[in-house]
Amino acid sequence: MRRLLVAGNWKMNASKVMLNELLSGIAENAPQQTDVVVFPPAPYLLAAADKLQGSSVKFGGQNLNANDSGAYTGEVSASMLVDCGCEAVLVGHSERRTLFAESDADVLAKTEAALAAGLVPYVCIGETLAERDANKTEAVVEQQINAVLNGLTVQQLAKCVFAYEPVWAIGTGKTASPEQAQQVHAFIRGLIATKDEELALNSHILYGGSVKASNAKELFGQKDIDGGLVGGASLKAEEFLGICNPA
Ligand code: PGA
């Protein structure tokens, strides 16, 4: 049985005041039946660790460098994230792929580095609108996920979380319909099954792209959607909690 998992990607949005208010609200009211994870920007991770001490809410980094240390100005390594108390890290978010030219090979290297440090990598994949319109959704998603499926062992993959985020639905208010999302999620689970059936059954595949409290229930009710990776709606405690508790 896959438990509902809801993750909040704050992107480049935070302040000390916001972190205090938001994490208090989430930590005090997170529903027991849902696994909740937040991804604040790197400078706030130690403050998040402090704030979430003793809470069931976990936190992680939004990015990492595949190297462990050294002359990489501005970068953050997996072991630093672990040292700050992180349990997870986002890898291959479409904004990283598009704005920072991250390739499938980068995504694999980062995923390996995260796993080696004991972090749960949230591997993000998804097609652009042009790719969907050209009927390339499955081809794009397959190529992106195969980069990790072919590069990792079943044991390593069992520690990953996958997130399907159609780029056209991110931050646009245009959510994929539950049927559209379910179709791609089922396709992704099928690809994981070609590696290992048990792995496919146990893998969490989150949906991301304009998830809100008002559409979470229907999306998460789909057979192959195990929760959400939430951007904009994760910045307001009440809205985010509504997604975490969509009953
Ligand atoms: P959104 O972002 O919920 O604001 O669409 C999702 C994401 O980018 O992870």
Image (cartoon, helix red, strand yellow):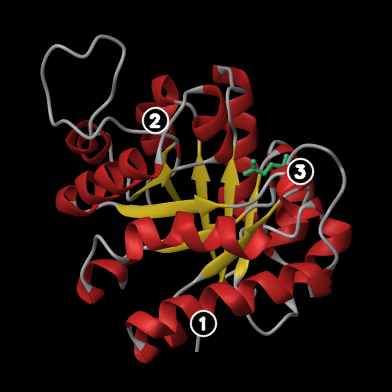
Q: Which sits in the foreground, 8 or 143?
A: 143
Provide residue 14's location: percent of width, then percent of height: 59, 22
Looking at the image, do the residues carrying marks 3 and 2 touch, with CB atoms under 8 Å apart? no
In the image, what residue occupies the spot 45% across and 42% down?
A: 92
Q: Can residue 63 be seen from the camera position used here? A: yes
Type of amino acid under label 3:
Ala
- Mark 3 vs mark 2, CA separation in Å: 36 Å
Residue marked by disc 2: 45
- Residue 175 appears left or right of 187: right
User: Would you place residue 75 above or below residue 134 in this image?
Assistant: above
* Residue that appears at 55% across and 23% down: 99
Circle number at residue 200: none
User: What whole-number distance in Å separates the C-alpha atoms at marks 1 and 2?
Assistant: 35 Å
Asked which secondary structure carries label 3, the reply is: helix
The quadrant of the rendering that contains the C terminus is bottom right
Is residue 50 found left or right of 25 in the rendered image? left
**What residue sits right under mark 3 in the picture?**
130
Left or right, 82 with respect to 223, comes to left
Does label 1 or label 2 sit earlier along the sequence?
2
Q: Give the foreground label among 1 and 2.
A: 1
- For the residue labelled by badge 1, is the local secondary structure a helix, a strand or a loop? helix
What is the quadrant of residue 55 in the picture? bottom left
Name the residue beneath numbered marker 1: 190
The image shows residue 241 at horizontal and vertical percentages of 71, 55
Report whether 50 appears left or right of 15: left
Say which label, 1 or 3, has the lower sequence index: 3
Of the two numbered discs 3 and 2 in the rendering, the one whose residue sits closer to the viewer: 3
Q: Residues within 10 Å of mark 2 (few under 14, many from 20)?
A: many
Name the residue: 35% across, 28% down: 46
